[in-house]
Image: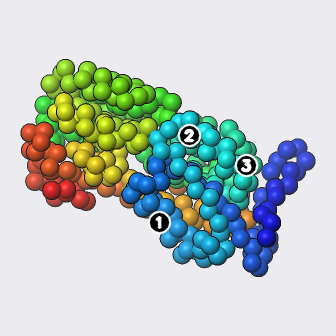
Amino acid sequence: MRRREFITLAGGAAAWPLAARAQQAGRVRRIGLLMTMAETEPEAQARLTSFRAGLQQLGWTEGHNIKIDYRFAAGDPDRLRSSAMELVRLAPDAILANGTAILSALKRETQNIPIVFVLVPDPVGDGFVDSLARPGGNVTGLTNFEFPMGGKWVELLKEIAPRLSQVALVFNPETAPYARKFLQSVAQGAEATLLPVRSDAEIERAAETVASNSNSGLIILPDLFTSGHRELIVAQAERYRLPAIYPFRFFARSGGLLSYGVDTLDLFRRSASFVDRILKGEKPSDLPVEAPIKFELVINLKTARALGLDVPLQLQQRADEVIE
């Protein structure tokens, strides 16, 4: 079967797929998917498994009535941009975009192909949608963090490191343009500074700089770059004995002290319902953006011991996972 071709309406508006065509017998639909991580990473595979499981529950099976074209940015902004161009050239029926930087790259390439995003903290502020209730355009999806989350991160860090008085927010300006919006909530609990990093060398220098104050810690912001460089970030935090909190479970499983954030696998499972509705003829502009409903706290006791930190029993009891 030849894949669907988009029809341009008068005035340049995109024509959305008709429900009748979506249900055409034997027709294989095409989905593009662009991930922040490397294909070999367990977290990337777990996210894909959750997405495919969500699709299957809705009657879409890879290799039967859908084809999925995968691309992986592996934390590389240049690779991200080229992968976005490749996917758009394939003209899929919908694209799943993992994160702000990926969504931004895809939006530059197409105003027609429906895009479902996952793990984007500020879709309205970054101009991706008109509003959460009525997105408009060709984009909708699921957010991951509200900016008051910064206050919660400081609170958790202080439970483990009570003397903490200063924190640095680590991020890459190119892939986390929303970083400054976390400052206000973080500053309510500690003196806060932004710490932009763009390379391995800058990560190493940043950790050394923060360590010059014995009462300092790190907040690692959700970001394609920090996720892709988490092994180095975790290693530098341990080297300089810096208490650090991370946005996702896989950081703690990579040796990070603790993480608190959304259940990423639940969001990827839920994203399948957006894709399903688009494939059946609904417009992204009419599908309200949804928020996360599941959050998880993970504590790495092995790392805490290496840093000389005591984790209160009450905090351990609240955790969804404690790594020994």
Q: State the SS at label 2.
A: helix
Where residue 183 is drawn, which disc sits there?
none
* Quadrant placement of the N terminus: bottom right
* Quadrant placement of the C terminus: bottom left
- Type of residue at label 1? Thr
- Of the numbered discs 3 and 2, the one sitting upstream in the chain is 2
Q: State the SS at label 1.
A: helix
Q: What residue is shown at x 56% (from left), y 70% (from top)?
A: 55
Q: What residue is shown at x 64% (from left), y 76% (from top)?
A: 64
Picture coordinates of residue 148, whole percent (x, y): 37, 39
- Type of residue at label 3? Arg
Q: State the SS at label 3.
A: helix
Question: What is the CA distance from the residue labelled 1 to the residue labelled 2?
Answer: 23 Å
- Of the numbered discs 1 and 2, the one sitting upstream in the chain is 1
Crowd rating for badge 1 (residues with CA inside 10 Å; few <14, some 14–19, many 20+): some
Question: What is the CA distance from the residue labelled 3 to the residue labelled 2?
Answer: 15 Å
- Dot 2 corresponds to which residue? 79
- Dot 1 corresponds to which residue? 49
Question: In the image shown, does 81 or 150 lie closer to the viewer?
Answer: 81
- Dot 3 corresponds to which residue? 89
Residue furthest out toward the bottom: 25
